[in-house]
Amino acid sequence: ALKPIGTFAKSFTLHFDANAHIDAAWLWREKETIEVCHNTFNSVLNMMEARPDFTYTQSAGAYYDWMERYYPDVFSRIQQRVKDGRWEVVGGMWVEPDCNLPSGESWMRHLLYSTRYFLKKLGAKVKIGWNPDSFGYNWNMPQFYSNAGIDAFVTQKMGWSEGNIFPYHAFWWEAPDGSRVLCYFPFDYVNTIDEPFRTVDQLRQFEANTGFRKMLILFGVGDHGGGPSNEMLDRIDHLKSLDVFPTIEYGTAAAYLDWLRQNNLSDLPVWKDELYLEYHQGTYTTQAKMKEWNRRSEVLMTNAEKFSSISTIFGGTYNRNDLEEAWRNVLFNQFHDLLPGSGIRENYIDAAEKYKAVEAIGSFELRKALNQIAKQINSPSVRNGAPVVVFNSLGWERNDIGVLQLPEGDNTEYALYDAAGKEVSSQVVPKGKYSREMLFEADHVPACGYKVFTLRKQKPSTGASALTSSRTALENEYFRVTIDPDSGWVRSIVDKRNGKEVLKGYGGEVQLLEDRPKAWDAWNIGLTGVKFPTRLRKIEVAESGPLRATLRVVRDYLKPGVKKDLPTPDYPSSFFTQDIMLYKGVDRVDFKSDVDWWEEKTMIKVAFPVTVQDTAATYEIPFGTIRRSTEMRTRWDSAKVEVAAQRWADLSQGEYGVSLLNKSKYGYDIKGSVMRLSLLRSPSWPDPTADRGKHSIEYSLYPHQGTWKEAKTVRRGYEFNNPLIAVMGESHKGKLPASKSFFSLSPPNLILTTVKKAEDSEAWIVQWY
């Protein structure tokens, strides 16, 4: 009587693929994960000996590298199983990284180093992107994957979204440039096969959603490794023996996707947007030091490669092995529980050591390369003078502010001259307790090149300056900034070029917001609507020079209702110093907030209500941009309470706009005409010390004519994060002139991102978008 039902059931197929989701570091440290990988992989290999139809899928180049270095016997067995077609290599990334915060160049390095490693060491050409547990996926990923020869993507995290149910389990994901990958969303990546009727119900849902009767099941224990077990395989064998149950087969993810492609996929839905996770948005901000190290390391490594490559023209060296080692450390720290800030405290101690190693290698290689180039420059001897070489790492000519570190304890007066003998505006300011640095006007510094100045021991000229300052106002040739004396917030920014008021309320307000997520403290934002007041202590003119004028606003905070025992009942628990800066010749309003932060369940945002408004704001993503609604009219838009961006976000209204630039911050929200940047959080789990301590946070307001494209906001974001590099040189004869560009690109919408030597030859790689 059940035979017809059995026949119908057997027309459906469950394709079982074993895997182990292994977190590189989360509630445990990296060194423990090495043993987790060893034990998991060894167990899988032993199971393969006993079961000839059993296959296994594993991502992450770092894990294979650990086996090669520490357990070569296990690595050798993996190599054989890859060759046999039973061990499937997926991912094409060094780890399973966060997919919003790494830069476009970091994406290129994940794919470069991992796909090369897999091909060289395992003979495996990766075709499947694999990132089941990251907290959302940037819109350019299909392009990145396609460029690396990867044509499919597997994840399941979108099922965690709080509000909207993601509608598809199989679909095409299309990047802005039209690149596509085939996406498959399993119901989970951790499955112990202990609820077979739930699995059958998922198959029913999958058939209703896609029309396909074969479904890929990823099984195995995850997070702390473990993977498949013999008990799981016994359960699958039992299910296979049932008359009234779907057909059972083992196979790789690639085998399933190959079957999927044999079907007519022309009617498969196409998703032309980011994959935004409506959950875990606090990860854009938590563990601010990680974000700062990441941005600095990305900038340092690309600069080191550019100038090391150029230096080889003049006899310099390009140390591929050291540079790759440094990059691998950067990439490892981008793992989706490290860079997002959702790990235990010990992981950030380990990560800091990796970043210090990156800084040591990157700084050494960069300094060596710059010195090698500087030696080739014709630098005539000048009495009481020394050459200063200013390098520009970006692919366009720049007019910007240079910064020269002066020798510690040196109180000599200096003036700076260009190659034509004209004195340039300069200003010496303190740098710490015992050092000083010189700010100077560096105009027309060539693209990806240098310009020579001369530092002379003499008193600088005191000519007329466009900068003026008072206790409540700053002004340069572009802007007039006014501070409200009672609150300390910016009351007005007038764009003098057109008389336009930029603000329609207090700008630069540092908002302390009660933040009580219901779950996943480090991951989620839980704003209650409560805003805590800070206390204004003083406003003062901190600097008033020919090149930079700074207003300093000092404030502190003690949560309302809290009384302390020492030193006084109302002694503050956190402290804020906000510097508001204008420079001569720079059309930005810069801010630096020094924060001594010791709160709990509180988030800091800085807010700018501006006089422009549009239905959508533009945000920078890796190697691209995305438009997101400011009106929140749909459920999908309303769910985007916090969004990720790289260096900037922009709100433009036709002929005028405002960009909010950042240095190492990633979380934004723009509702209506209020632009907010998230600065700090204070979760208590899994790291109860997260974000506590001292921070120096830089951001900038860039009002502009026209759209963000016409205003070259992309360039402004790069400039804000890539300062000019000033190097003290020596007088000598040389073949190079006083000013030179090694690379430049046209038209001006092209962004030069990489100049490096090839991995396996002396060819050069130049990359732009």
Image (cartoon, rainbow, N blue to C red):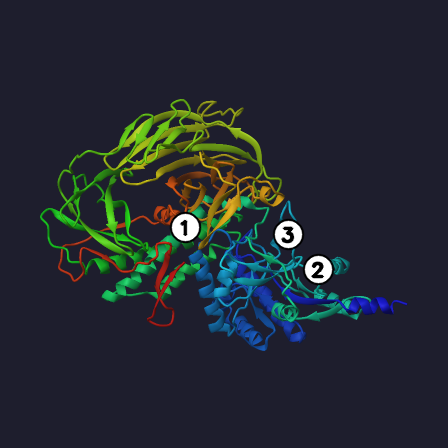
Name which residue lies at 44% across and 65% down: 113
- In this rendering, would 564 be left or right of 209? left
Residue at the spot of label 1: 295
Instruction: Residue under label 3, please give it.
Output: 166
Q: Specify whether residue 93 is in view.
A: no
Q: Which residue is mark 2?
A: 206
Across and down, in percent, residue 595 comes to 41, 36
Q: Quadrant of the N terminus?
A: bottom right
Distance CA(mark 3)–CA(mark 2)? 13 Å
Question: Could you tell me which secondary element the residue under label 1 belongs to?
Answer: helix
Q: Nearer the viewer, residue 386 or 140?
A: 140
Q: Check the picture and name the quadrant holding the C terminus.
A: bottom left
Q: Kindly state the secondary structure of the residue where label 3 is placed.
A: loop
Instruction: For residue 377, say whether it is visible.
Output: yes
x%, y% of residue 598?
47, 35
- Residue 702 in the image: state x and y as whole percent: 38, 40
> Residue reaching furthest front?
655
Cβ atoms under marks 1 and 2 closer than 8 Å: no
Is disc 3 surrounded by few (<14), some (14 to 19) or many (20+) residues within 10 Å?
some
> Circle 1: is it few (<14), some (14-19), or many (20+) Cα within 10 Å?
many
Out of 739 and 32, give the one closest to the viewer.
739
Numbered badge on residue 524 = none
Q: Is residue 684 above or below residue 307?
A: above
